[in-house]
């Protein structure tokens, strides 16, 4: 005998609850009931939980059926258990296979879970290339933010190899941009607003919520350190710089170390101590945004931090706050400090050399010219430390060579000789594709450890034409693409003024397993 309770639904951005009770009595002699709750934590509409009560201890295995199944298991034998269901298809009566294994037998049943459609402003996704046997395992996670008239509503998304959205978190309750979306070492999700750091599990359950000191404002990146603490890009309320005799409020030019166990800031770095705040060759924003720090990478070999500043380049700072090097065109670098009264920065600039260790000519060093085998990263994002000690970074390319004639973005790998203060380019991908992958802002690059492939994300392509993003997985051995997807945005502020929060963006993407 089977009995079902009624199905209750509300809108997709409110609490959705679905309750189904099955009572099984069959040839196996197993009696059980299954209670299904859709979107149990209110912000993850393509998830559910199955609460299973059984008269014999069982292990549980579930499978969301479809072209690309998603499976979860609980190996412990119990008489009552709750298992997570992830990867439901939107706008579908999903069929979920439930397998109960017990001493002496097995019972398999199918339950049904109805979901609603994804929001209308979500992007459409086209998979352009797929060579599964050459790809890094997992699905495709996007740190995506939707235009909301000067603000953003954030909803990280995971899609499968066919371009179907299979998971997302509705973070619109925060009321502003919250990101970057990342999976930390314990398997949970970490995102951050201006002052708030959230930790969720994959079901959308809030595990932790942290409010940092209101003197700080988080900007663009939160990095988990090896001990579980956090390193954050921040601005402060009371930081000023002096440029051309004017005192200007600055932003996004500090790092802080946040101790999660003590729930407090324990260390602060002022990047203005090490850089020339008056250098404005690539600052097309307001004057106080002289650095526009957007990413951090920690080097555990010597406890140093690689910093990406869109308006200055890359730099490396030690844990005890000493400048190690600057990777940037050698033009208009003066003294460091908020008032320009610090030390000379020129000795810390890396010299670009070719494969034979010979420095390029002056026009290359200053960034006025590029060569076939070398260019600086312009407006960079997302530096990543490779296992071989080299660095890859997303070279956005805005105002490359100080003009708008060379518009391309790329993933690029550099080898740095710190003792000699030199560096060389050893690999790149993207230049040959020109404006097709050109993203003047945001974007990402990652190393994929199992295949050793590179995942490149151009998050803001041709907003005045067909506004989209590109995600490409490439094999660096032959520079051939093994996966490529195009994400077509539906910018919601049609006809409104341009600017931050007026156009959809894809900040970063990751390859990620869909499991709790």
Image (cartoon, helix red, strand yellow):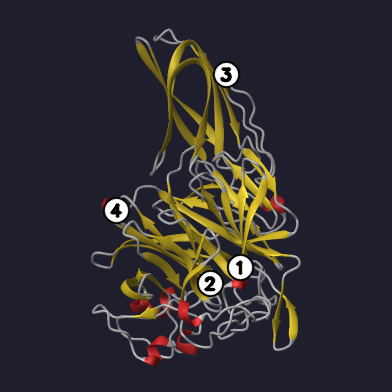
Q: Which one is in front in this view, the residue at disc 1 or the one at disc 3?
A: 1
**Mark seen at residue 467:** 2
At a point 69% along the width and 51% down the height, the residue shown is: 196
* As drawn, 125 above or below 334: above
Residue ranking furthest to the top:
29
Q: Are marks 2 and 1 in contact (CB under 8 Å)?
A: yes
Dot 4 crowding, Cα within 10 Å, few <14, some 14–19, many 20+: few
* As drawn, 314 above or below 43: below
Q: Position of residue 14 (x, y in %)?
A: 69, 43
Which residue is label 1 attached to?
Answer: 491
Q: Earlier in the sequence, mark 2 or mark 3?
A: 3
Label 4 to label 1, Cα distance in Å? 35 Å
Left or right? Give the position of 477 relative to 18: left
Is any part of residue 233 visible from this angle?
A: yes
Q: Earlier in the sequence, mark 2 or mark 4?
A: 4
At a point 75% along the width and 56% down the height, the residue shown is: 214
Q: Quick one: 226 or 425, which is closer to the camera?
A: 226
Which residue is label 3 attached to?
Answer: 3
């Amino acid at each position: 005998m089977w009995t079902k309770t009624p199905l209750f639904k509300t809108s997709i951005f409110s609490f959705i609850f679905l309750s189904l009770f099955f009572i099984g009595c069959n040839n196996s002699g197993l009696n059980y009931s299954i209670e299904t709750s859709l979107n149990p934590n209110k912000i993850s509409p393509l998830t559910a939980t199955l609460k299973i009560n059984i008269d014999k201890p069982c292990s549980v295995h579930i499978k969301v059926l479809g072209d690309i199944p998603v499976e979860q298991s609980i190996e412990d034998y119990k008489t009552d258990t709750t298992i997570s269901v992830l990867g439901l298809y939107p706008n579908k009566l999903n069929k979920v296979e439930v397998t109960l294994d017990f001493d002496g037998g097995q019972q398999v049943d199918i339950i049904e879970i109805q979901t609603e459609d994804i929001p209308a402003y979500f992007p459409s996704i086209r998979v352009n290339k797929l060579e599964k046997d050459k790809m890094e395992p997992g699905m495709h996670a996007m740190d995506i933010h939707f235009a909301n008239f000067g603000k953003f509503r954030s909803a990280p998304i995971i899609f499968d190899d066919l371009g179907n959205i299979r998971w997302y978190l509705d973070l619109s309750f925060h009321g502003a941009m919250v990101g970057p979306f990342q999976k930390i070492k314990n398997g949970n999700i970490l995102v951050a607003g201006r002052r708030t750091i959230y930790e969720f599990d994959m079901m959308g359950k809030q595990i932790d919520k942290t409010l940092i000191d209101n003197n700080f404002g988080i900007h663009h990146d939160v990095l988990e350190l090896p001990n579980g603490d956090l390193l954050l890009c921040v601005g402060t309320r009371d930081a000023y710089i002096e440029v051309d005799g004017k005192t200007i409020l600055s932003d996004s030019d500090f790092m802080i170390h946040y101790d999660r166990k003590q729930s407090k800031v324990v260390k602060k770095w002022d990047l203005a101590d090490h850089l020339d705040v008056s250098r404005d060759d690539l600052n097309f924003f307001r004057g106080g945004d002289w650095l526009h720090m957007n990413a951090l990478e920690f080097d555990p070999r010597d406890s140093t931090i690689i910093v990406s500043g869109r308006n200055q380049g890359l730099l490396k700072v030690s844990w005890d706050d000493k400048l190690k090097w600057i990777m940037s065109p050698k033009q208009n670098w003066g003294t460091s400090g908020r008032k320009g009264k610090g030390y000379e920065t020129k000795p810390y600039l890396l010299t670009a050399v070719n494969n034979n260790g010979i420095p390029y000519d002056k026009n290359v060093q200053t960034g006025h010219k590029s060569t076939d085998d070398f260019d600086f990263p312009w407006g960079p994002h997302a530096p990543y430390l490779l296992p071989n000690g080299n660095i890859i970074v997303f070279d956005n390319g805005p105002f490359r060579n100080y003009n708008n004639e060379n518009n391309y973005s790329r993933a690029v790998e550099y080898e740095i000789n710190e003792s000699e203060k030199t560096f060389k380019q050893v690999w790149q991908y993207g230049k040959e594709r020109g404006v097709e992958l050109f993203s003047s802002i945001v974007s990402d690059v990652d190393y994929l450890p199992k295949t050793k492939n590179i995942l490149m994300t151009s998050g803001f392509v041709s907003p005045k034409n067909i506004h989209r993003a590109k995600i490409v997985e490439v094999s660096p051995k032959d520079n051939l693409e093994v996966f490529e997807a195009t994400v077509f945005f539906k910018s919601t502020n049609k006809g409104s003024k341009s600017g931050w929060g007026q156009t959809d963006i894809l900040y970063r993407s990751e390859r990620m397993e869909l499991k709790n």
